[in-house]
Amino acid sequence: MGANPIVWLHEAALRADHPAMRAAGPHATAVYVWDDAQLQRAGYSLKRLVFIYECIAALNITLLRGDTVAVLSALKPDPLYVPACSAQWLEPAIAALQAANIPFVRVADVPFVPEKRGHDPKRFFQYWQRAEKYAFTPAAETLPL
């Protein structure tokens, strides 16, 4: 682990128990970058923005404002822990951070409901019909889906 580990908790990973927090270690700084341009591109409603802000406040993490890549680069993370997600808006930021030679580590999330075989992400309803009976059990094991 480097001298300045930082965890970038973007809106797809705003929770205290994200594996990126554990991977970064107890001395890491968790940040959220309030990027007005990105939030506008995402088309979030005022209600969604308030929800994001309330999550940040509840987590008691550092809130920074500005261009995501510029802000994260200025922090000089060593390394930057990035929670992985499938959101397309994340990829340009990752590419720009790579171009700026920012060392980063993508940290995969623990699946909500693990499966033995994959599912078609375009068919969530079919997946949920199979998964919901297992989703809220105390110790969900690998599903027989």
Image: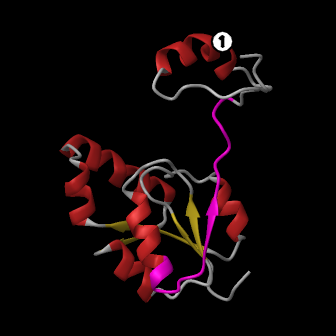
Residue 34 image offset from top left, x and y in percent: 31, 66
Name the residue beneath numbered marker 1: 133
**Is residue 126 visible in this depiction of the protein?**
yes
Q: Circle 1: is it few (<14), some (14-19), or many (20+) Cα within 10 Å?
A: few
Q: Is residue 142 above or below residue 82?
A: above
Queried whether the magenta region covers residue 33, the answer comes back as no
Quarter of the image where one finds residue 25: bottom right
Q: How is the image coloured?
A: secondary structure
| Corner quadrant of residue 68 | bottom left
Q: Residue at x 71, y 71 (%)?
A: 26
Residue at the image point whose x is 71% and y is 31% from the top: 114
Q: Look at the numbered disc 1 and give the secondary structure of its residue.
A: helix
As for residue 109 lying within the magenta part, the answer is yes
Position of residue 73 relative to residue 81, above or below, is: below
How far from the left and from the top, in percent, is residue 52? 35, 50
- Residue closer to the observer: 75 or 96: 96
Q: Nearer the viewer, residue 55 or 41?
A: 41
Q: Which sits in the foreground, 113 or 100?
A: 100
Q: Residue 103 at x, y = what percent?
A: 59, 81
Q: Is residue 136 visible?
A: no
**Main secondary structure found in the magenta portion:** loop
Residue found 69% across the figure and 85% down from its top = 2
User: In the image, what residue type sits under mark 1?
Assistant: Lys
What quarter of the picture does the N terminus occupy?
bottom right
Q: Which residues are magenta?
A: 98-113
